[in-house]
């Protein structure tokens, strides 16, 4: 398997259900986040106001800087393409936090181990087949699937929508695909 996620910002309503489910499922300490949805706006003039929604989380890069800088191999990519952390191997150097170009990692104040989204691989994904954020999204703005399976619904979404990947120019090959809420030219730094 090669797990990936699509964030369709055209369907997102900014309800924060995904962030709440993530915090609850993964026992994320207050003030820290595995995922956030930033809301920008409103833009335009009443009654034609729009908001932009942007998801910030691990991009599940295929060529992950956070993995390559880890001196103990505590940060690794598993057999399903999920970037994870082996807390038994971590020495707390925090190189992975500094190397992530997406600012998706944080130091867990309770465990003193770097933390990040891992698609709820040991909890919700293992028990229900999808991350907690996907299961609670009321508008189906999040699609999770296997890029190695042409029959997976994620395939249809990627084949029928324009999408971008954040900071793709860095060569990290992120597997979080974003369907932007914009018309015309699309650019992400």
Image: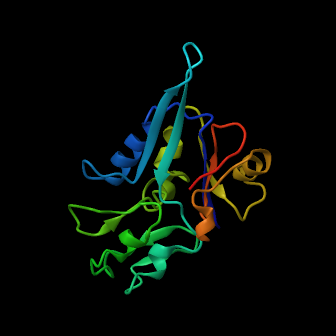
Which residue is at the front of the view, 70 or 41? 41
186 shown above or below 71: above
The image shows residue 36 at horizontal and vertical percentages of 42, 46
| Residue beneath the point at 48% across and 59% down | 58
Q: Residue at x 37, y 71 (%)?
A: 98
Residue at 41% x, 43% y: name it. Answer: 19
Q: Nearer the viewer, residue 54 or 149?
A: 54
Q: How is the image coloured?
A: rainbow
Q: Quadrant of residue 113?
A: bottom left
Locate the C terminus by quadrant: bottom right
Decide which of 46, 86 is in the foreground and name it: 46
Q: Position of 92 compared to 46: left or right?
A: left
Question: Is residue 93 in view?
Answer: yes
Q: Up-down: is 120 above or below 14?
A: below
Image coordinates for residue 82, horizontal then vertical, percent: 53, 67
- Of residues 38 and 83, the one nearer the viewer is 38
Percent across and percent down for residue 83 are: 49, 69
């Amino acid at each position: 398997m090669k797990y990936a996620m699509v964030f369709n910002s055209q369907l997102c309503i900014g309800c924060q259900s995904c962030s709440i489910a993530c915090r609850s499922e993964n026992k994320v300490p207050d003030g820290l986040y595995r995922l956030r949805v930033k809301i920008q706006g409103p833009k335009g003039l009443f009654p034609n106001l729009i908001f932009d929604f942007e998801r910030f989380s691990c991009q599940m890069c295929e060529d992950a800087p956070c993995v390559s800088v880890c001196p103990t191999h505590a940060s690794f990519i598993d057999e399903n393409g999920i970037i994870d952390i082996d807390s038994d191997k971590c020495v707390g150097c925090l190189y992975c936090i500094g190397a992530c170009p997406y600012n998706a990692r944080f130091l867990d104040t309770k465990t003193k181990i770097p933390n990040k989204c891992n698609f709820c691989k040991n909890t919700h994904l293992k028990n229900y087949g999808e991350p907690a954020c996907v299961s609670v999204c009321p508008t189906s703005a999040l699609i999770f699937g296997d890029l190695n399976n042409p029959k997976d619904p994620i395939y249809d979404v990627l084949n029928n929508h324009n999408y971008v990947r954040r900071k793709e120019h860095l060569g990290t090959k992120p597997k979080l695909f974003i369907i932007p809420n914009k018309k015309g030219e699309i650019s992400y730094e």
